[in-house]
């Protein structure tokens, strides 16, 4: 799966990536470790808490923005923060 995801990532490492419904951060953490700024959105506060703990344990240099939101209503996630895919 990472091979597939990586093929669609922008070359510009300053491009913010949204991991919508990302749970405990499996892909968000990998994206952040790859150098991208990442916003992880999930409905579950518990999942986001686990992602925060994982990020701290991995000592990821760039903080991951954690947003509690439902993927069918991302009103809490600023739209302008993300570029458009190619």
Image: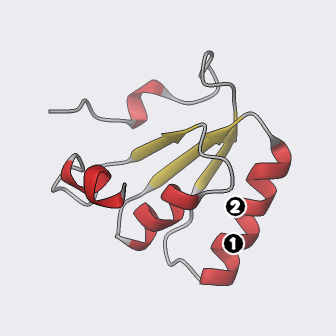
Closest to the observer, 28 or 82: 28
Q: Which mark is residue 54?
A: 1
Locate residue 76, reporting x and y percent: 64, 26
Drawn side of residue 15 relative to residue 17, left or right: left
**26 vs 51, nearest the viewer:** 26
Residue 38 in the image, given as x and y percentages of width and height: 47, 53
Q: Position of residue 26 (x, y in %)?
A: 56, 60
- Residue at the far front: name it: 1
User: For the point 59% across and 22% down, which residue is it?
Assistant: 74
Query: Foreground: 29 or 78?
Result: 29
Pointer 1 local density, CA inside 10 Å: few below 14, some 14–19, many at least 20: some
Residue at 59% in and 83% down: 59
Point 61% across, 37% down: residue: 21
**Residue with the most extreme right position:** 46
Q: Is residue 17 above or below residue 33?
A: above
Left or right of 55 on screen, residue 79: left
Q: Quadrant of residue 3?
A: bottom left
What's the distance in space between the residues labelled 1 and 2, CA to CA?
5 Å
List x then y, in percent, for residue 14. 28, 57
**CB within 8 Å, label 1 to label 2:** yes
Quadrant of the rendering where the N terminus is positioned: bottom left
Q: Secondary structure at mark 1?
A: helix
SS for dot 2: helix
| Residue at screen point 15% across, 56% down | 11
Q: Residues within 10 Å of mark 2 (few under 14, many from 20)?
A: many
The residue carrying mark 2 is: 51
Residue 39 falls left or right of residue 82: right
Number of marks: 2
Note whether 42 is above or below 39 in the view shown. above
């Amino acid at each position: 799966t990472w091979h597939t995801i990586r093929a669609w990532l922008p070359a510009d490492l300053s491009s913010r990536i949204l991991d919508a419904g990302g749970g405990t951060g499996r892909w968000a953490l990998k994206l952040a470790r790859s150098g991208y700024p990442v916003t992880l959105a999930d409905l579950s506060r518990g999942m986001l808490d686990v992602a925060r703990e994982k990020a701290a344990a991995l000592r990821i240099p760039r903080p991951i923005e954690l947003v509690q939101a439902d993927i069918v209503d991302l009103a809490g996630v600023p739209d302008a923060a993300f570029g458009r895919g190619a």
